[in-house]
Image (cartoon, grey):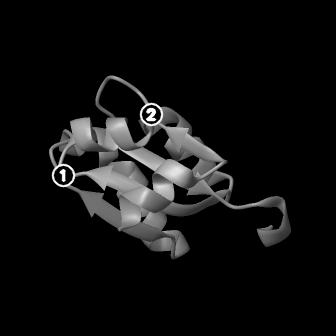
Amino acid sequence: MPLARLKQARRKTVGSKQTAKAVAKGLAEVVFIAQDAEEHVVRDIIRACEERGIQLVYVNSMDELGKACGIEVGAASAAILKTETDS
């Protein structure tokens, strides 16, 4: 289950601003997008991931993604970051 991997990840981003920065810097390994997130919030992240060949995983809801990240509010996006040895 992809969310289990996110829960266990030591290095991750939570939220669209931090995830977008990680994608732009080439630090994201896998990006998670909540299907109920507003399209304008995640559009650029999705496009950047597609351009860079970064794996996208869609999850049902922002609440589900937020819980997987260990926060009590919803999250539109999150990412597992590459380890130093992956860079």
Q: Is residue 56 something that shows in the picture?
A: yes
Please name the amino acid that badge 1 sits on.
Answer: Gln
In this view, 70 is above or below 20: above
Q: Secondary structure at mark 1?
A: loop
Q: Which of disc 2 and disc 1 is earlier in sequence? A: 1
Residue at 17%, 53% in the rendered image: 60
Residue occupying image coordinates x 30% and y 38% = 41
Quadrant of the frame with the C terminus? bottom right
| Picture disc at residue 35 | 1
Give x and y (percent) for residue 52: 54, 71
Circle on res. 81: none
The residue carrying mark 2 is: 70
Q: Residue furthest right?
A: 85
Is 50 drawn above or below residue 33 in the view shown?
below
Q: Report crowding for label 2: few under 14, some 14 to 19, many 20 or more residues within 10 A (C-alpha).
A: few
Q: Amino acid at mark 2?
A: Gly
Measured Cα–Cα span from mark 1 to mark 2: 19 Å
Whole-percent x, y for residue 30 in the image: 51, 64
Q: Using the rendered view, name the quadrant where residue 81 is placed.
A: bottom right
| Outermost residue toward the bottom in this view | 53
